[in-house]
Amino acid sequence: MRTDDTMSNVLIEEDFNGLITKAVLTDSTLPSTADKFSVGCILTNKSDGKVYRNVGTVAVPSWNDVDSSGISEISLPQYGREYYVNGARTDTYTADGSYLKPFKTILAALAVINADSTVQQAAGPADYALNARYILNVAPGLYSDNLAVGNVKYLRINLNGAAISGNITYTTTMVGGTADQYYSKLEFFGGYGTRAEKGNSGRITGAITATRNNDSLSYISFTGVDVAGDVGFATNGTWVLSYHNSRVSGRTTTADAAIALIETTGWNEFTGHLANAADAVAAISLYNADNTEFDLININNGAGSRITNCSFKSNVTVTAGTISIDNNSYKSLLAQTETLTGATVSLIDSYLPAAAAQEEVVLTGAISIAKYLTTIDTSAGATAYTLAAGASIGQRKKILLRVDNGDATITGAFTGTGNTLTFANAGEFALLEWNGTDWIALELGSYLNMAHVPTITTV
């Protein structure tokens, strides 16, 4: 310990930036010297063991006996733009959003957040991108106010077992034009673990409506949340909906030129319809859906879908775009009354066999790759055919010479440098598989004479 020349009764234990943060008092006289003690400095009286805290200022220190301090004398620091809400508080105090003086409604907290976001926008795009970011911690309870989320850059609402029954509107406008300024994000966090509808997780029963007046990209994510209200998007631009371990029983809709891309991770369940009112088509893509149960779907899939480990419980209507899907998910989809008009299906883990009837080609021409089996007939004499590249790695194609009155010569990309597949006898067949570059011969054989097989040559 050391002393200060101006205060002989104070022994300094710790200091920081020239201000005393911890000291020992050798008598009962509390010091009042200016510019010596930090706010919050702890002072221990050596004679009676009492502890005092500077609740005044650096210029005018004021000492409170810590043992007799009331809650009004204590405050926790405000960490950036992080706020607290506790609707169960019934005592009287001036709320500031701190841990000890939380707002009593989410509505009051959002009023402060939206006002600050407006200030950041006025300061310019760089300040907005850096500072219009907020965290809102909500204590358990039911919050029934209708809520309006303004043009925040980022907002995370930690529900902590809380339920929101009021409607939520989210209005966002792009501020600036660089890549970082182009995006905004709104997150609802209810808790970890699956089955959000069971146990102490976040719950939203009111409708969520999101709008904007530009084509910026906005993200809305739900983690461990039971989303029971409808979620709807309007005006232009793309909205990304991210779900992790959540349950969605409300309807998901789009209007005007809005497009919604759904991404799911963990385990999720949609019992609500992905469709507009009366189950009309909505502009929604299952952009990256994994491990999710879906109910009725009627979507325009213009942005494309990637579906893995998913199941379907009701009618599935998908128009436009490409559907990349694994085998098991596709089987579940086909088990429903599916309509895939205008959509292209591509299996992720194997080639999708064509459902069309087999093809018989008699005249010179192209052999279809959209049909699994093609039988050929050379009763009119030797005939030349062509076989195009496969549609997907793993696609299989079978060709059978049914009637022979001359060789059938097929030109295409075959194993290695082979470019010609020739059938000379009735009953010969070739089972081929596309590897991305060539048709690989899995089997070359004959149903009638095992000595007769088609041949692959390079011409």
Image: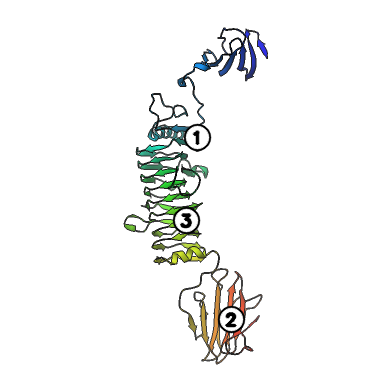
Identify the residue under disc 3.
Answer: 292
Q: Position of residue 114 (x, y in %)?
A: 41, 35
Question: What residue lies at 46% left-to-right and 27% top-to-bottom?
Answer: 100
Q: Position of residue 386 (x, y in %)?
A: 55, 79
- Callout 3 crowding tier (Cα within 10 Å): few <14, some 14–19, many ≥20: many
Question: What residue lies at 55% left-to-right and 76% top-to-bottom?
Answer: 397
Q: Amino acid at mark 1?
A: Asn
On residue 430, the disc is 2
Question: Which residue ends up furthest to the right in the rendered image?
Answer: 1
Identify the residue under disc 1.
Answer: 131
Q: Secondary structure at mark 2?
A: strand
**Marks 1 and 3 in Cβ contact (< 8 Å):** no
Q: Position of residue 206 (x, y in %)?
A: 36, 44
Quadrant where the image shows the C terminus: bottom right
421 lies left or right of 302: right
Q: Secondary structure at mark 3?
A: strand
Q: Relative to 382, say whether 46 is above or below.
A: above
Is residue 27 among what the camera can see? yes
Is residue 119 among what the camera can see? no
Q: Amino acid at mark 2?
A: Ala
Q: Nearer the viewer, mark 3 or mark 2?
A: 3
Q: Amino acid at mark 3?
A: Thr
